[in-house]
Image (cartoon, helix red, strand yellow):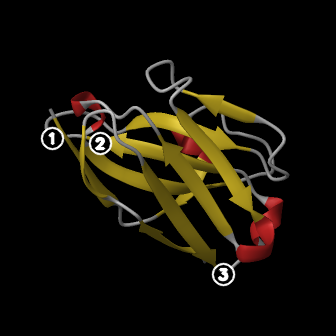
Amino acid sequence: QVHLVESGGGLVQAGGSLRLSCAASGRPFGTYAMGWFRQSPGKEREFVAAINWRGDSTNYADSVKGRFTISRDNAKNTVYLQMNSLKPEDTAVYYCAHGETRVIPTTRRGYDYWGQGTQVTVSS
């Protein structure tokens, strides 16, 4: 069993920055990939970013490339999402997800545990 707790969401103006954190417990954190997803009202949950177990491989959705950075601190059992140059269309609930293996999953089914989410609202 894995427990994920997101934090760092909030209200920010367009062009601003936020850093999300996800603290994990329950399994050796450093042996699994991690990801971030988001969901806005009326839309399906979508992939944002992912990182492998060592932190030396990352993937990003095209919509956030160059603006968001995923990172992890295995000593602190925490994964981060630094979000810069935020846009109103980034408004969503952001979810942390735990991968089933060390490598970045290719589909959403490759994640086996999810956090409760943290709201990010970007005003124009």
Q: Is residue 58 at all visible to an observer of this figure?
A: yes
In this view, the residue in front, 53 or 1, is 53
Residue corresponding to mark 1: 41
Compared across the picture, whether 89 is left or right of 111 comes to left
How far is disc 3 from disc 1 in space, using C-alphas?
31 Å
How far is disc 2 from disc 1 in space, using C-alphas?
7 Å
Residue corresponding to mark 2: 39
Q: What is the crowding at mark 3: few (fewer than 14 residues within 10 Å), some, or many (at least 20)?
A: few
Q: What is the crowding at mark 2: few (fewer than 14 residues within 10 Å), some, or many (at least 20)?
A: some
Of the residues shown, which amino acid type is indicated by label 1? Pro
Give the percent coordinates (x, y) of residue 15.
33, 33
Residue corresponding to mark 3: 26
Question: Residue shown at 68%/50% (left/top)?
Answer: 71
Quarter of the figure with the C terminus: top left
> Which element is circle 2 on?
strand
Of the residues shown, which amino acid type is indicated by label 3? Gly
Q: For the residues labelled 3 and 1, say whether their Cβ atoms are less than 8 Å apart.
A: no
> Which element is circle 1 on?
loop
In this view, the residue in front, 114 or 5, is 5
The tag earlier along the polypeptide, 2 or 3, is 3
Q: Nearer the viewer, mark 2 or mark 3?
A: 2
Quarter of the figure with the N terminus: bottom right
Q: Is residue 85 above or below residue 96?
A: above
Compared across the picture, whether 74 is left or right of 120 comes to right
Question: Residue shown at 65%/30% (left/top)?
Answer: 59
In this view, the residue in front, 21 or 110, is 21
